[in-house]
């Protein structure tokens, strides 16, 4: 019996059972997929629900082609039945106009101009914390992270699509890499695409590829990330930044397991395990209409949440020890005044910020042979919204506030997009030349990283 099988047996959560239980035990709901009511849901329990334009319906949809009481949906054995009630245009299911239809989880039908889908609600699975304090490059003492370690071990055994959630800098890509490294696909490719760093015009080509001549500048054909990762794992970071059009195409690929390169007539089959990540609350995006609910439920078969560093201060010491060892310093003890300084910080940039602080400390402390000997500097955290100097004239006081804002904004922006000036400029909405000048003025350009034109950015 392998280590992963032993873990699954010990917890009584073999992943095949866990995933099927997620689908079975999660309550099922009806989701409005498109239109003005996109994202609206209603639970599908043991009793029937009625959908229509009337306020007394279980799910009210404002669509001029929907009757007051248009259809009824109810459980029917292991599936569901949708039945026309009082409408004249009935139900559109699998391109046919019908009076009733038998549905399964994931099926979509249309009434009026509004498509609806039967989906399992998404929730986190509670598991026992792992005994291990390390999974690959991830190290932790906290219970919350050791629960995540268990989920990684379990989820790695399946091809189930995973959604990794957490703030910028918590290490979502490391979690994705461990899912791949512990999976049967570990000998195949791991391909990562940052959906937030690519302009819309290039995203489809990066994901799906293109043929020669597909657009201006396409002098050679390109294999997209889905084809590059075939047999392995594709990591889609920052999926919340995808446009609705890109979301629709991604959903089609996930459902059909085929891709059509930009400009191509034929489709290519792909065998890919997809892991997605988001630092935004996708459920809020679904409710707000900026993220497709059917794509969200397709991605969130298994959800893994990476807690922010401020919520697990007990992890700072082991993470610091691991970072320093990689930097060439093997500290016997991580404690004292320097650890107190680190644990009192709120870490808005999470583990990425901690790594930057410690790497800077190593550079500024040549010859240091212990953790206590490191010169650790942290930006002061003000408890005020604005630190205003009323002892100065208005113009001088305002200049100081602007200076402090610029330094804080640029530091966090650099932590979000390390060594990528183009992505930073796009996110900030300013041109690269202006951004480069601001980074220089605030001493935020270092000599260990470069943008795509060779300029040092952080």
Image (cartoon, rainbow, N blue to C red):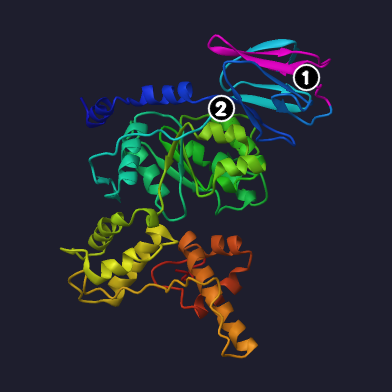
Q: Is residue 221 above or below residue 251?
A: below
* Circle 2 SS class: helix
Residue 255's disc number? 2
Q: Residue at x 84, y 28 (%)?
A: 64
Span highlighted in magenta in the image: 65-94
Q: Nearer the viewer, residue 238 or 256?
A: 238
Q: Residue at x 49, y 78 (%)?
A: 442
Q: Residue 249: give x, y in percent of width and height.
A: 62, 36
Image quadrant for the N terminus? Answer: top left
Q: Nearer the viewer, residue 67 or 236?
A: 67
Give the farthest residue toward the left: 332
Q: Nearer the viewer, residue 80 or 216?
A: 80
Spatial CA distance of label 2 from label 1 is: 31 Å
Q: Is residue 209 magenta?
A: no
Image quadrant for the C terminus? Answer: bottom left
Q: Is residue 371 above or below residue 352?
A: below
- Please indicate whether residue 239 sits to the left or right of residue 369 in the image: right
Q: Residue at x 34, y 45 (%)?
A: 144
Give neighbour class at mark 1: few <14, some 14-19, many 20+ (Cα, 10 Å): many
Q: Residue at x 79, y 31 (%)?
A: 62
Whether residue 387 is visible here, answered yes or no, is: yes
Give neighbour class at mark 2: few <14, some 14-19, many 20+ (Cα, 10 Å): few
Residue topped by disc 1 = 69
Q: Residue 109: give x, y in percent of width and height.
A: 68, 21
Residue 448 position by quadrant: bottom left
Whether residue 259 is visible here, answered yes or no, is: no
Q: Residue 406: give x, y in percent of width and height.
A: 55, 74
Q: Residue 319: give x, y in percent of width and height.
A: 29, 57
């Amino acid at each position: 019996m392998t280590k992963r099988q032993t873990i699954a047996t010990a917890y009584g959560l073999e992943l095949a059972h866990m995933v099927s239980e997620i689908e079975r035990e999660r309550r099922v709901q009806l989701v409005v997929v498109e239109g003005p009511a996109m994202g609206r849901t209603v639970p599908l329990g043991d009793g029937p629900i009625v959908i229509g334009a009337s306020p007394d319906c279980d799910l009210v949809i404002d669509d001029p082609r929907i009757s007051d009481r248009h259809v009824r949906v109810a459980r029917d054995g292991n599936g569901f039945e949708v039945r026309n009630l009082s409408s004249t245009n009935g139900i559109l299911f699998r391109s046919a106009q019908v009076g009733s239809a038998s549905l399964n989880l994931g099926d979509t039908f249309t009434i009026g101009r509004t498509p609806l889908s039967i989906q399992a609600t998404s929730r986190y699975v509670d598991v026992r914390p792992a005994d291990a304090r390390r999974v690959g490059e991830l190290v932790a003492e906290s219970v919350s992270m050791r629960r995540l370690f268990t989920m990684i071990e379990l989820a790695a055994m399946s091809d189930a699509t995973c959604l990794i959630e957490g703030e910028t800098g918590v290490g979502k890509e490391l979690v994705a890499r461990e899912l791949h490294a512990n999976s049967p696909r570990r000998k195949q490719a791991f391909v990562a695409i940052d959906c937030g760093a690519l302009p819309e015009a290039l995203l489809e080509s990066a994901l799906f590829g293109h043929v020669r001549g597909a657009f201006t500048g396409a002098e050679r054909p390109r294999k997209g990330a889905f084809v590059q990762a075939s047999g392995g794992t594709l990591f889609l970071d920052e999926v919340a930044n995808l446009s609705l059009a890109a979301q629709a195409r991604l959903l089609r690929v996930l459902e059909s397991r085929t891709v059509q390169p930009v400009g191509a007539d034929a489709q290519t089959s792909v065998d890919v395990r997809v892991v997605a990540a988001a630092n935004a609350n996708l459920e809020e995006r679904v409710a707000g209409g900026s993220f497709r609910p059917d794509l969200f439920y397709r991605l969130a078969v298994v959800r893994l949440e990476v807690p922010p560093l401020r919520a697990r201060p007990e992890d700072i010491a082991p993470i610091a020890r691991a970072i320093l060892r990689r930097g060439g310093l093997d500290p016997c003890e991580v404690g004292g005044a320097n650890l107190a300084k680190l644990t009192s910080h709120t870490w808005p940039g999470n583990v990425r910020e901690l790594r930057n602080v410690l790497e800077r400390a190593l550079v500024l402390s040549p010859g240091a042979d212990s953790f206590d000997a490191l010169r650790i500097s942290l930006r002061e955290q003000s408890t005020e919204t604005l630190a205003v100097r009323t002892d100065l004239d208005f113009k001088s006081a305002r200049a100081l506030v602007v200076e402090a804002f610029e330094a804080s904004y640029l530091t966090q922006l650099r932590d979000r997009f390390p060594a990528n000036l183009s992505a930073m400029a796009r996110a900030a909405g300013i041109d690269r030349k202006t951004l480069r000048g601001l980074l220089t003025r605030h001493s935020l350009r270092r000599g260990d990283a470069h943008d795509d034109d060779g300029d040092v950015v952080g």
